[in-house]
Each structure stands twice: as C-alpha cells, then as structure tokens.
Image: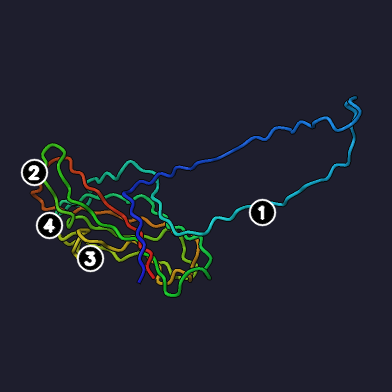
C-alpha cells in the first residue's frame, strides 16, 4: 500500500521561476583568399526541430486566497451558542493520464481542527470537538465518482443526524473512489458551525484548520 500526503493550512502560495536567454548574431570571419577579404565559399544550413517539453500530470490541492475564516454568531439557542462561517474553496486538480494511474488508486481530502485559544488569555480554550462542518461539492462530478464528505456536528448536537464528534479528528471533506474514473478539477467548500456551551467565556478565539490531501493505492 502506497500513500502520499499533501497538507495545507487554508492558504497556499506557488513560486515559479522563469529562465530566458538571448543569442546575438554570429560574426562571419574573413574567408581564405588573396588578402583582399573577398573570400567566398558554400554555406551549409544546419537545422534542428525541438519539440516542446511536456510536464507529467500530477495530483494537487490548493486553497483559495483568504485571510482566514471569521465565525459570527448565528443560530444560538437554549442548548448552545452557535457561530458560523464558510470554508474557503478547496480545489483538487488531477492532470494525469488515466492509463498512468495505478488500478484501485484513490484520493481524499480530510480536515482537522486545533484547539481554539483566547487571544487575551491562553488559559481560555474551546476544544476542536465543538467545531463541525457540512462539506459541499461546488463542481459537478461527470461520473459521480467525486463526492463531498458527510456532515459532522459539534459535540453539542445541531439536531441533525450528523455524528456529534466535531473536527477533533480527521474528517472527510471530499474524495474519489477510483482516481482513474474522473480526471480534471473538483472544487469544494464547507459550512462551518462552532457550537459552544451557553456559558462559554467571552473573548476572541483562534484555531487552525488543517487540510490534507491523501493519494493512496
């Protein structure tokens, strides 16, 4: 079993390097002769046909440019205070040739949240189990092979049938059952919902949501 992993924390940057060169005209030397500089001769054309290089296809994940996700209070009730937001768009691109993909290979993107810590007092925390999400596929899957992960609720249930475990562990955002079934680009995001106890301490809290792309065969 072979597994490759790529990890992103909501933002990705790519640095490209371009190389260029300039070739000046060649200066012809005086040919042989009687010293007058009027030498003559037959020229031979030399040519070469250089085909463009091809870059092997690859599987990659990027996250839309963002300045983080700010959750705002929305939908609080007697059971919990609730704060919601939207995960930036996550794009998985597969440019490989289907015939180059090993049989049975699949990919998946998972997410896991860290502990929320108050900016003014590190002793005030909210566990990652209080953050849930509802993944949403933004692009059509031409074969139906690409699908969004199932919703996950905070440990303080949102009243749905979603598992009330939060993002304390790795939870599925999007996946494909067989990579060779569909080549191209898939986009996904997720509705985020932090449901805390009603007596949660006031403050500005911060957490890190880590996304990882696994490619396994």
Residue in the picture at 33% in, 60% down: 135
**Disc assigned to residue 79:** 4
Closest to the camera, between mark 2 and mark 3, is 2
Sequence-first disc among 4 and 2 = 4
- Determine which residue is flagged by label 2: 123
Sequence-first disc among 1 and 4 = 1
Inter-mark Cα distance, 2 to 1:
62 Å
Dots 3, 1 in contact, CB < 8 A? no
Left or right, 176 with respect to 53, comes to: left
Res. 211 image quadrant? bottom left
Counting other residues with Cα less than 10 Å from the Cα at mark 2, is it few (<14), some (14-19), or many (20 or more)? few
Closest to the camera, between mark 4 and mark 2, is 2
Left or right, 188 with respect to 131, comes to: right
Sequence-first disc among 2 and 1 = 1
What secondary structure is found at the residue carrying circle 1? loop
- Determine which residue is flagged by label 1: 51
Res. 121 image quadrant? top left
Where residue 112 sits in the image (x, y, percent)? Answer: 25, 57
Inter-mark Cα distance, 2 to 3:
32 Å
Closest to the camera, between mark 2 and mark 1, is 1
What secondary structure is found at the residue carrying circle 4? loop
What secondary structure is found at the residue carrying circle 3? loop
Inter-mark Cα distance, 4 to 2:
24 Å
Inter-mark Cα distance, 3 to 1:
58 Å
Res. 179 image quadrant? bottom left
């Amino acid at each position: 079993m072979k597994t490759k992993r790529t990890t992103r924390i909501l933002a990705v940057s790519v640095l490209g390097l371009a190389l260029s060169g300039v070739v000046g005209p060649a200066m012809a030397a005086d040919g042989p002769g009687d010293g007058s500089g009027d030498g003559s001769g037959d020229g031979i054309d030399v040519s070469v046909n250089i085909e463009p290089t091809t870059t092997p296809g690859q599987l990659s994940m990027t996250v839309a440019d963002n300045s983080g996700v700010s959750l705002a209070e929305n939908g609080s009730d007697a059971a919990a205070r609730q704060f919601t937001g939207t995960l930036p768009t996550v794009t998985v691109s597969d440019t490989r040739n289907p015939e180059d993909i090993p049989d049975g290979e699949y990919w998946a993107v998972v997410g896991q949240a860290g502990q929320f810590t108050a900016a003014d007092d590190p002793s005030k925390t909210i566990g990652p189990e209080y953050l849930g999400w509802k993944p949403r596929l933004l692009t059509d899957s031409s074969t139906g092979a690409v699908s969004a992960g199932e919703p996950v609720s905070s440990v303080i249930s949102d009243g749905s049938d979603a598992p009330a475990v939060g993002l304390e562990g790795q939870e599925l955002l999007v996946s494909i059952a067989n990579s060779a079934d569909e080549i191209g680009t898939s986009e996904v995001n997720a509705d985020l919902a932090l449901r805390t106890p009603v007596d949660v301490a006031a403050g500005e809290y911060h957490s890190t949501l880590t996304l990882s792309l696994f490619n396994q065969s």
